[in-house]
Image (cartoon, rainbow, N blue to C red):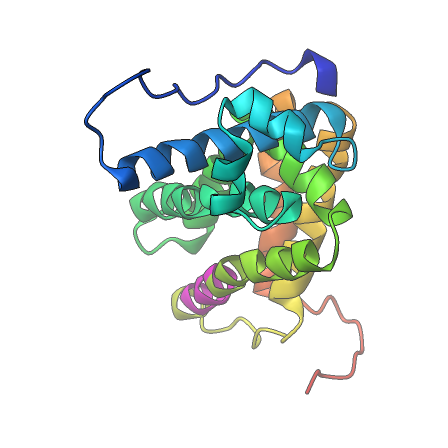
Amino acid sequence: MSRHEQKEVPAARPLPRGRHGLSPDTVRASQRDRLVEAMLRLVARRGYAATTVPDVIAAARVSRNAFYEQFADKEACFLAGCERDLPEMIDSIHAAASGAGDRWREALRLGMAAYLRWWQERPEYAQAYFVELPRAGERAAEQRDAAYRPFLGMLGALAARARLEDPSLPPLRAAVPRLIVYGATEFIASEVREGRVATLTSWAGDLCHYTAALLAGPDQGIATTPSA
């Protein structure tokens, strides 16, 4: 599915016209939601560089003043959109993996399926996050690094569970969680760039195999220098 063929994500519903009795906080929250949704949709379709603040304001149906009350600039709005729903995604992974009991490979399988399905169901978000976020500047790179931290933690915890289940496994190498996160992220990004977001879940088996092999750490007889 190409960028232009992706299914449109509906905008947040605007507030009623005239006197509506809503609190200022409710009004600001509605405006913020509409702005970040408009930003993500436009960036997914046009690219980050081609998206302007006036475009976002028009799509969100808010005033220029309302935009700048919420965000310092275009980048701040885009970054807010990219990070807004990540806690929901993390929760969905934990919820899926909780059905595995003490079986770490089953937890990995369930969590990976939930992760890929989450992105597959949000093609415009996937386009904005995986393709456009790396192009949005230094602050975007810092935010993406911060977004990796929960996944590094999850992989470390999964590796610990694996060693409780099988004490014969070698110690986890320090670089392994980063190798998994960066490698899997770039693989998914390549699928999104090629317009294949609708089939992300088809790669669950391969990504699980890749992740499990690194977490279990078989040496395969290769002589290496242990990491510090």
Q: Is residue 1 visible?
A: no
Q: Is residue 226 visible?
A: yes
Q: Residue at x 69, y 57 (%)?
A: 141
Is residue 20 shown above or below 71? above
- Rendering coords of residue 171 (x, y %): 56, 77
The one nearer the camera, 117 or 86, is 86
The one nearer the camera, 181 or 15, is 15
Is residue 96 shown above or below 41? below
Q: Residue at x 77, y 37 (%)?
A: 190
Is residue 171 shown above or below 143? below
Q: Would residue 208 appear left or right of 48 to someone viewing this image? A: left
Quarter of the figure that contains the N terminus: top right
Which residue is situated farthest in the bottom direction here? 228
- Rendering coords of residue 191 (x, y %): 73, 32
Main SS category, magenta section: helix
* Magenta span includes 72: no
The one nearer the camera, 19 or 126, is 19
Task: Identify the magenta region.
Answer: 154-162
Q: Would residue 80 appear left or right of 97 to someone viewing this image? A: right
Count of picture labels = 0
- Rendering coords of residue 72 (x, y %): 58, 51
The one nearer the camera, 186 or 86, is 86
Quarter assignment of residue 78: top right
- Rendering coords of residue 21 (x, y %): 19, 27
Quarter of the figure that contains the C terminus: bottom right
Q: Would residue 85 appear left or right of 1 to someone viewing this image? A: left
Q: Residue at x 51, y 38 (%)?
A: 65
Q: Residue at x 43, y 40 (%)?
A: 110
